[in-house]
Amino acid sequence: MKPNSLRAHLQTGQPVIGTMIQEVSSPFIVHVLANAGFDFVYVDLEHGRFGLESAVGLVQTIRLTNMVPLVRVPDNQYYWIARLMDAGAQGVMIPRVETRQQAELAVQSFRFPPIGQRGLAVARGQNDYKRQDSLAFAQEANRENLLIVQIESKKAVENVDEIISTPGVDVALIGPGDLSLSLGIPMKMDNPLMVSAVEKVVASCKRHNVIAGLHVGDVQAIKYWSQNGILLLSGSSDLDILLDGSIQLCKSYKEAVAI
């Protein structure tokens, strides 16, 4: 199967940068993001507009580029996790994980035996429809693919050691928007409560040899946390990029006309 370049890069201790696709199902958006130089991209099924077939089309297009395809599933269910991995995702992000039991459930759906209980289907998008020895494939998939749990509530932070010490979890990704709401400080990313929560997650990741991640639209936050223990960094989305670009372009045109 295709090696996971994102995992390999993270193992060097260097940060990686990605973004998210939520609205545009055309393959053009994948090539635009790849040409921009992103290391990975999430296809978002929690807040995005996609059905399964559209998401699979995006995942398989991402596989043709130098980016790594990741998917945020809408819920911690076998149906979503296993089918999107079969289709070619090289990792999934599980939203709203708050307990070790939820983390264990995700591992069971994501990993092949003996680690988990995911059903085996070899010649699929996950290995570009090639025939392969079943045991070798399962071992490679367990080694290469990334299971990402989202830490995005006060309860999750309180239980972070129990969650990310779960065997089979690779990344703990902080969702700062929801976390800030849960802490009662909506969107105040520099609030001491928020900073303390993120630091607690990062420290736990170091103890348990798990990668810390963050999805945030603030460049200064990305700069700061990339220097303070977070390696899997992403921000914005196709929708945000279109909105921000359109606003800036229109503003520049109006300023030019007014001159």
Image (spheres, helix red, strand yellow):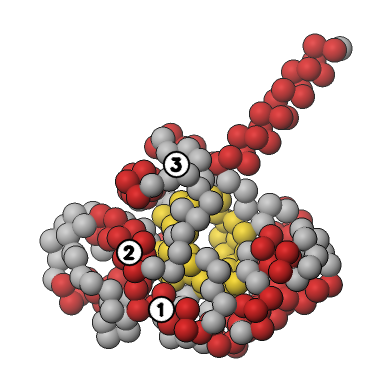
Residue 105 position (above or below residue 125)? below
Q: Which residue is mark 2?
A: 79
Q: Residue at x 76, y 58 (%)?
A: 187
Q: Which residue is mark 1?
A: 105
Q: Residue at x 13, y 61 (%)?
A: 131
Q: Which residue is mark 3?
A: 30
- Foreground pick, 40 / 48: 48
Horizontal side, residue 57 vs residue 37: left or right: left
Q: Residue at x 82, y 19 (%)?
A: 255
Residue 226 position (above or below residue 257)? below
Give, as a three-letter code, the residue at label 3.
Val
Q: Position of residue 23 (x, y in %)?
A: 50, 40
Horizontal side, residue 85 vs residue 18: left or right: left
Gap between marks 3 and 2 measured at Cα: 25 Å
Element assignment for label 3: helix
Q: Position of residue 199 (x, y in %)?
A: 72, 77
Q: Of the residues tagged 3 and 2, which is closer to the observer?
A: 2
